[in-house]
Image (cartoon, grey):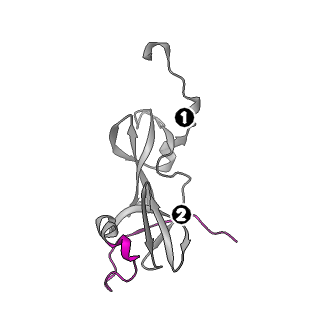
Amino acid sequence: MNVEPRFGYYPWWPEDGNDWLHPEDVELARQCIPSMRIFCREGEQGPFVVLRYGELRLRVMRTLWKEVGWEGFCLGDWVEVLSRGKRNTPRTATIREMLWDVPSRAIRYQVVEGDQPIANLFAAEDLRHIDPTELQIRPDEE
């Protein structure tokens, strides 16, 4: 039974040093853990679990992982930000960050429109998947 991928975050650094990391990944891990970033656990490589966050890839032992439920979105996904009663500015964007929000106990998503990051964080219900190959360029945008 395949149980991958799984999603979770590391809200703290283990107190027992670096032995829980692949030796080649220690420096990179120290740059991004602890944080509220939602990593995707993709599988195993020897005794290590392989985690991915966009292009970032880490090999870690199973320790202090706070697993969270997947909400259907991943980094790099194309989405439409829904108006939701004019609460949001509708836009087409890609997911740039996935962060755990402790008070709401849910993932929050930062998106980027073009090359511009949008400051607001969005909940899953604010987003809808879109297929970028189906995006139409209006005549006035050419």
Q: In this rendering, would 124 be left or right of 88?
A: right
Furthest residue toward front: 24
Quadrant assignment, res 100: bottom left
Element carrying mark 1: helix
> Marks 2/1: CA distance?
26 Å
x and y percent of residue 77 in the render?
Answer: 51, 45
Mark sitting on residue 75:
none
Question: Is residue 103 visible in the rendered structure shown here?
Answer: no
x and y percent of residue 126 in the render?
Answer: 48, 43
Element carrying mark 2: loop
Question: Which range is magenta?
Answer: 1-26
x and y percent of residue 5 in the render?
Answer: 57, 64
Amino acid at circle 1: Pro
Mark sitting on residue 69:
2
Residue shown at 40% from the left, 81% from the top:
20
x and y percent of residue 30 in the render?
Answer: 30, 70
Quadrant assignment, res 141: top left
* 15 falls in the magenta region: yes
Mark sitting on residue 132:
1
Q: Residues within 10 Å of mark 2 (few under 14, many from 20)?
A: few
- Depth check: 60 or 116 in front? 60
Residue shown at 45% from the left, 71% from the top:
59
Count of numbered circles on the image: 2
